[in-house]
Image (tube, grey):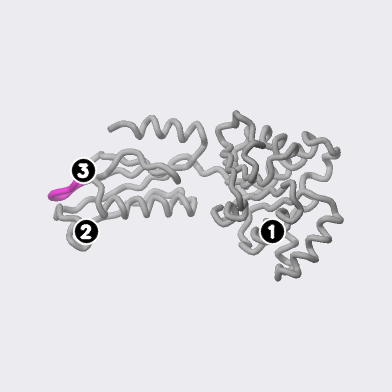
Amino acid sequence: MEEWIDALAELRRRGEPCVLVTVLDELGSTPRDRGSKMLVSAERVVNTIGGGHLEYRALAIARQMLQTGSATMQIERFPLAARLGQCCGGTTRLLFEPLIPARPQLALFGAGHVGRALVQILATLPLRVRWVDSRAEQFPATLPDNVRPQAIDDPLDAVDEMPPGAFYVVMTHDHALDLALAARILQRGDAGYFGLIGSVTKRKRFEYQLGQRGIDTAAMASMRCPLGLPEVKGKLPAEIAVAVAGELIACYGALAA
């Protein structure tokens, strides 16, 4: 029952946050002994603290902590009576311990030449990258640990699934899709960073079209287009990627300060 140790090591390697749930004490009949542990990440649960509604409630608390980025330990007391749907009749306290500070999440839309060049730099940064494109064949066979490819027919769905404060970089092969993604991101209104590839002319055209969709000028002001550090010149994919990565570093650095 020590699988959680190996799972925690893997999550640390990937920089993925998790919550360790520990049975602190027990009074009367309880489903698991003191010291029992369960590791919860956004996508995995390793080990168990006894199942049933107790575990359901514990998972809900742990996942809420992950969603909000909570870094504070908390202790919760659970009476294992009919109200909790448990028949043990005892009482237990659980410790919820956030582990591995969450890295900012970034959704990168577009797996073209610039997107592939940018991913090579993002692999070295403290970010968790969701790389979205409808064309599965565009993704390289081997990807860095912190990059998760997602080939989906409607990339707009990926915007809806991102947490508050996420970063977005839009550089697809389709201007209509770029516009739709920009509208969806700005409608959310909670991006930590939003960069859109393109020229000043593209920005002006998009501002008009976004206004037609009901996006106000204050929201559009948060959109970085052209994106990337202006001091970094050049039109090669690698040069654009360096400029974008520099701007991302400046953004998450300012948030951490």
Q: Quadrant of the rendered structure where residue 24 is?
A: top left
Main secondary structure found in the magenta portion: loop
Label 1 vs label 2, nearer the camera: 1
Residue 47 placement (x, y as % from top left)? 31, 39
User: How far apart are the two marked residues, 1 and 3, measured between alpha carbons?
Assistant: 50 Å
Mark 1–mark 2 CB contact (< 8 Å):
no
For marks 1 and 3, the one nearer the N-term is 3
Amino acid type for the residue under numbered disc 2:
Gly
Q: Residue at x 63, y 56 (%)?
A: 191
Q: Which residue is mark 3?
A: 32
Secondary element at tag 1: helix
Q: Nearer the viewer, residue 179 or 7?
A: 179
Q: Which residues are magenta?
A: 26-32
Question: Relative to residue 197, is residue 19 drawn left or right?
Answer: left
Label 1 vs label 3, nearer the camera: 1
Q: Nearer the viewer, residue 124 or 101?
A: 124
User: How far apart are the two marked residues, 1 and 2, measured between alpha carbons?
Assistant: 45 Å
User: How far apart are the two marked residues, 2 and 3, measured between alpha carbons?
Assistant: 16 Å
Amino acid type for the residue under numbered disc 1:
Ala
Q: Which mark is residue 85?
A: 2
Q: Residue at x 14, y 55 (%)?
A: 89
Q: Quadrant of the rendered structure where residue 45 is?
A: top left
Q: Which mark is residue 204?
A: none
Secondary element at tag 2: loop
Amino acid type for the residue under numbered disc 3:
Arg
Question: Relative to residue 49, is residue 62 drawn left or right?
Answer: right
Secondary element at tag 3: loop
Q: Which residue is mark 1?
A: 180
Q: Residue at x 58, y 55 (%)?
A: 157
**How would you rate the neighbour count of disc 2 (Cα within 10 Å): few for under 14, some for 14-19, many for 20 or more?**
few
Residue 147 placement (x, y as % from top left)? 58, 37
